[in-house]
Amino acid sequence: MASTRLLILIAAAALLLAAAVPAARAQEETDHEDEFSYIVGEENGPEHWGKIKPEWSHCGGGEMQSPIDLTHSRVTLVRGLGYLNHSYRAADASIVNRGHDIMVRFNGDAGSVVINGTAYYLRQLHWHSPTEHSVDGRRYDMELHMVHESAEKKAAVIGLLYEIGHPDRFLQKMEPYLRMIADKQDREEKVGVIDPRGARGRASVYYRYMGSLTTPPCTEGVIWTIVRRVRTVSKYQLELLREAVHDDMENNARPLQAVNHRDISIFRPIPHKRY
């Protein structure tokens, strides 16, 4: 009898732990490359993600899903959002081929960004091509996601948009490591100390809305910040990223999701007056 009660307690504890997986950690550990696809029309394509597993139900039935189109007719100027208050620092990191994308995981303290008075600590960053978010219906060539997590295990993601042009300096530093893990799913390599400030840049205008992870389990309650300034990446760098991923898909961007009744805000500094 005692052993039966012990087994029941262990099973209950396991269920509680599974339910407590934080959103940022869920995105970090998404490695279901054989279970979901970005190809519309496939059995495991994005329109079917919500039916593949019970815990992925938000992908199909959520009301606050990401990505979305940042349509200016729906955007409200909110100066009270303030400048992005981030304090990033160089930290030890690894590069991981997750099968559906390439991720840089910070093993040390890479700093944080403060949103609404709460510190969100940078955990990892990864790339999507083309961009997942669009601006007035336009999708650019690449989107970088900087994934953060608060002490309460809530997620906040900063997204940066890129178009084909001059090489991206941050990616230039990562090129040797991209070649090391090319076409090798679940391959992880130490890359030493990486400074995320090179990825973030200094642009101050950004969009803000509440959404979700863009890969299964599509957990909601994620604070999204999309930087307005579009940066550049070379065609070679974009091809290197895509060729390194261990899949047969031409892109790894989730289709746009319904905005529903969500608010989309934009922060823009007050222009300096000239005297």
Image: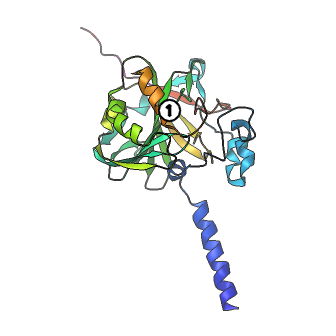
Instruction: Identify which residue, 144 or 114, lies in the foreground.
Output: 144
Residue 244 % position (x, y): 48, 36
Task: State which quarter of the image contains the N terminus.
Answer: bottom right
Predominant SS of the magenta segment? loop
Spot the residue most to the left: 275
Instruction: Identify which residue, 16 or 139, lies in the foreground.
Output: 139
Element under label 1?
A: helix
Quadrant of the image occupied by residue 43: top right
Image position of 15 (left or right of 21): right
Quadrant of the image occupied by residue 197: top left
- Under mark 1, the amino acid is Glu
Vertical side of 134 occupied by 145: above or below: below
Residue 229 visible in rendering: no
Q: How many marks?
A: 1
User: Image point 57% across, 45% down: which residue?
Assistant: 221
Spot the residue most to the bottom: 1
Residue 156 % position (x, y): 48, 43
Magenta region: 267-271
User: Image point 45% across, 46% down: which residue?
Assistant: 96
The residue tagged 1 is 243
Image position of 103 (left or right of 44): left
Q: Is residue 270 magenta?
A: yes
Residue 192 % position (x, y): 29, 47
Q: Is residue 99 magenta?
A: no
Image position of 245 (left or right of 74): left
Task: State which quarter of the image contains the C terminus.
Answer: top left
Vertical side of 153 occupied by 83: above or below: above
Residue 172 % position (x, y): 33, 30
User: Image point 71% across, 52% down: which residue?
Assistant: 53
Residue 271 visible in rendering: yes
